[in-house]
Image (cartoon, coloured by chain):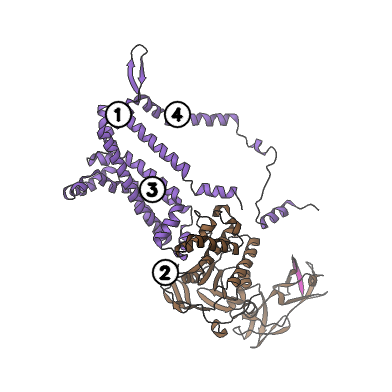
Amino acid sequence: MSVASPSPAATGHGVAVAFEDMHRWYGSVHALRGLSLEIAPGELIALLGPSGCGKTTALRALGGLDEVDQGRILVGGKDMTRVPANKRNMGIVFQAYSLFPNMTARDNVAYGLRLRGVDGAKRKKKAEETLELVGLGAQASRYPHQMSGGQQQRVALARALAIEPSVLLLDEPLSALDAKVRRQLREEIRRIQIMVGITTLFVTHDQEEALAMGDRVGVMSAGRLEQIAAPAELYDRPATKFVAEFVGLTNRIPGRTDGSDVEVLGTRVPLLPGATDRGAVQVLVRPENVRLAAADGGTGRVLAVSFLGSLCRAQVALPDETIVVAQMSATESAGLYPGATVNVSVVPAPVFAVAE
Amino acid sequence: MSQAPGFEYAAAAQDGGALISKRPKGAGKGRRTPLSQRAARIVVLVLVLGYLILPLFAMLEFSTRGDFDRTTKTFGRTLDSFAAIFSNDDLMTSIITSLEIAVLTVFGMLVLLVPTMVWTVVRVPRMRRVVEFLCLLPLAIPAIVIVVGIAPIYRWMGQNLGGFGASALTLAFIDVILVLPYSYRAIDSSLRSIDTATLSDAARSLGAGWPRTIFSVIVPNIRGGILSASVLAIALVLGEYTISSLLSFNTVQVVIYLLGKRNPYVSVAVSLAALVFAFVLLFVISRFAPGADSRAQRAEEEPA
């Protein structure tokens, strides 16, 4: 379970990594627009955002693989902004398979140790221990082409951890894997990260991954950090329209607000800070906060019902033709079928609203 | 309850397991090539092989001719022409000189091309086209134009740089340029078969500087391309005649030509030996330097 850490400075844990007002231009494209962020020691921060939002640029800048045009990067209080990549002591796992094809898994893991002058026997022992850590002790003599994608990414993780880096950087390491392996590996990465206690920056465009793995999740858009918060807070209390719409599934239901509350589907619910606070609005309501009650003569008409295992999702058309998605447990969905009429209401949880 | 085929497929794919499909009986028969097509292929193959091998066979036949027997009206067989290669001082000197030029050319080409191409791919990919254009340029410039342009420099070197300036080894400077188009293609295809940028980033993040990244990570993985580029360079240098002749350097091709006027048997024997040498080199490379394609193929064969 994730532990929320609103801000490293506030928790008194100190700061392992700090981005200070980072800017990066690629020609006319402003990839990073004043990115500032603090990561506590041992914390896993997930940077989440759509393609081109600047999350990978931020990670590469921290790893020294890309430069920043303005701003500073501090690691353990030291300014690393102009330090070359090979002097930063950071372990990186890349999106693409990055194992050296000419080396066995053991040699790949030992590569960084060899560069640090660790002698042969110690190097071999450490490499094999680290491979054991990722569950690949028996595969040490295999070459990358003899391993599956998931195994290759585990070796890449072992290679990054073997050098005992100050920060672990994960650049969408799971995106090339199939769904099942991806779920297994993300849990394993999180387990190892907590066990080793290493400060980690994890970049992904998969919100399920980000919410499942991050102590805190930073949502980026167009080079800016929109919000950084614990997963539950990010999901329940989005600070901006972008976060409200980008994270999780969201219904847009017409409503009317007077400033502090909004009336939606006959229920008054509190407005979140930052929401549009006057007049007719589109209220952003999570599917799990929509309630359906089967009733003859109800105002909503069920269009479709999707069975998702323990959960069920139903699409309902309102009288004004707005389509609303409701999510409930499988037992609650009894009596729902395409064509059934239902009464639709919302749970009075705080919501975000945007202008119509 | 029986499962639908689609469900079985999805389950296998979710497990990440290999999908093994049995070949239906008789599936191969439907695709069997008709006899006429197979016969046509064999005929084409024989014709092509004949076209390629016949000249070599003719060279062998000519260079091994001995005394003419008037009774049988046939030539005897002898390896004197091949033995003469080693007893002809001019020829041996020119072979050694050409091999030295080839070694220098390969060295120069690799030192110039490999770091440049790696740097271009990793750091300035937008310059890839420019580098490619520059490397392919020698294809478009006739050798005679290069000689006319460069002859004054060689004259100056001969007059001012003593023994080195007058040495045939200086031909390596021109040969490095001449082999660029072929070597570029060989190395480029190897670089494209690996994720050069990611491998470099990985090596650097682990603490390797640029020289170490190139020599311990990139070069071993483009070994096939480097060997191919080297063989092409050697073959080109050993076969280069125009520039050596016009600049009055006695390389092997120039000496073969001069020898051909005096003793055509030895001349043809040397040419044949040079061809066989190139074939052997190519065979060694194809045997001992498997490329990325065969590596990928092995990966498919051995799913983990």
**Numbered mark located on residue B50 in the image:** 4
Is residue A263 rendered to the left or right of residue B238?
A: right
Residue A159, horizontal then vertical, whole percent: 53, 63
Few, some or many residues within 10 Å of mark 3 (<14, 14–19, 20+): many
Query: Residue type at mark 1?
Result: Ala
Q: Compute the Cα span from label 3 to label 4.
A: 29 Å
Region of the chain picked out in magenta, as a range = A299-306
Q: What residue type is labelled 4?
A: Gly
Element class at badge 2? loop
Within 10 Å of disc 4 (Cα), the crowding (few <14, some 14-19, many 20+) is few
Q: What element carries label 4?
A: helix
Q: In which quarter of the image is residue A328?
A: bottom right
Q: Check disc 1: other Cα within 10 Å, few if <14, some if 14-19, many if 20+.
A: some
Residue B61 within the magenta-colored segment of the rendering: no
Q: Can residue A95 be seen in this view?
A: no
Task: Look at the image and tell me in which quarter the N terminus of chain A lies.
Answer: bottom right
* Residue A300 forms part of the magenta stretch: yes
Looking at the picture, which amino acid does disc 2 mark? Pro
To which residue does mark 1 refer? B84
Q: Colour of chain A?
A: brown
The numbered mark, 3 or 4, whose residue comes first in the sequence reads 4
